[in-house]
Image (cartoon, rainbow, N blue to C red):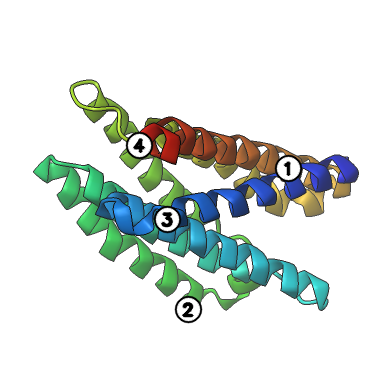
Amino acid sequence: MKLTFEVFNIIANCILGLNFILYLSQFNKRDRAFKIYTLYIGVIVIIQIVSKVFVKFGYENLSVSHFYFILQFIMLSLFYLELFKEKYQKNLIKISLISIPFVIILNLIINTNLIFKFSLLEIAMTSLAIIVYSTFHFYNMLSSKKYFYFVNCGILIYIFGSSVPFLMHNLQFTYGEDFAWLVMLLNVVLYTIYQILVLIEWKVNFSKNKNE
């Protein structure tokens, strides 16, 4: 199981790096939503590198997860804020952008023991908000252009599917190492699917051949 995880992890990170290079190559030619999503990919690349460095030097990397969840939430909120046209949808994002990080940071300050653990509140709040955004975008695409359709599919699949493994991660101390590896494997498989869909989005809608 550990070997399978490592294989999927390498594949996912390779596709992630490729996606960043491809999207970055069109950065100056696209709209704000595209640019924000490209920056989001870049942020994830940096977090992945930092996490690997922590592990390499024997440090606990669960503290990095807080940057991952908060920054992912902020970047995807800004991304959907650009995509949405309805005022109530934009207002929901604006309110969430202020309230959710505030609650998460306050919770970490009050419960400092969570700094080196996955915060269930943090995962639940950020994941639920992004799932709502993604669902809204699917609804909006029923009557408009299917812009970032594959990316939106990937976001919904990954965020919805991976929130359960993350929430269950702390149970590894109860159910043992095999359970922990199973949770991690499920997460990396879903993330690989997400990155493949991001790559498909590029190929279908943003590749140079398509533009030409």
Q: Residue at x 88, y 46 (%)?
A: 2
For the residue carrying disc 1, how many other residues have a C-alpha within 10 Å: few (<14), some (14-19), or many (20+)?
Answer: many
Instruction: Give the class, few, some or many, for how many residues have Cα within 10 Å of label 4's Cα (few <14, many ≥20).
Output: few
Which amino acid, mark 4?
Answer: Asn
Of callouts 1 and 2, the N-terminal one: 2
Q: Which residue in the structure is indicated by mark 3?
A: 38
Residue at 31% across / 53% down in the picture? 29
Q: Which of the marked residues, 3 or 1, is nearer the chain's N terminus?
A: 3
Residue denoted by label 1: 183
* Side of 123 relative to 49 (left or right): left
> Where residue 80 sits: x, y (%)?
29, 47
Cα separation between marks 3 and 4: 18 Å
- Image quadrant in which you'd find residue 53: bottom right
In which quadrant of the rendered view does residue 36 lie?
bottom left
Q: What is the quadrant of the C terminus in the image?
A: top left
Q: Is residue 3 left or right of residue 121?
A: right
Between tags 3 and 2, which lies in front?
Answer: 3
User: In terms of image quadrants, where is residue 1?
Assistant: top right
Tell me which label, 1 or 4, sits earlier in the chain: 1
Which of the numbered marks, if any, corresponds to residue 211? 4
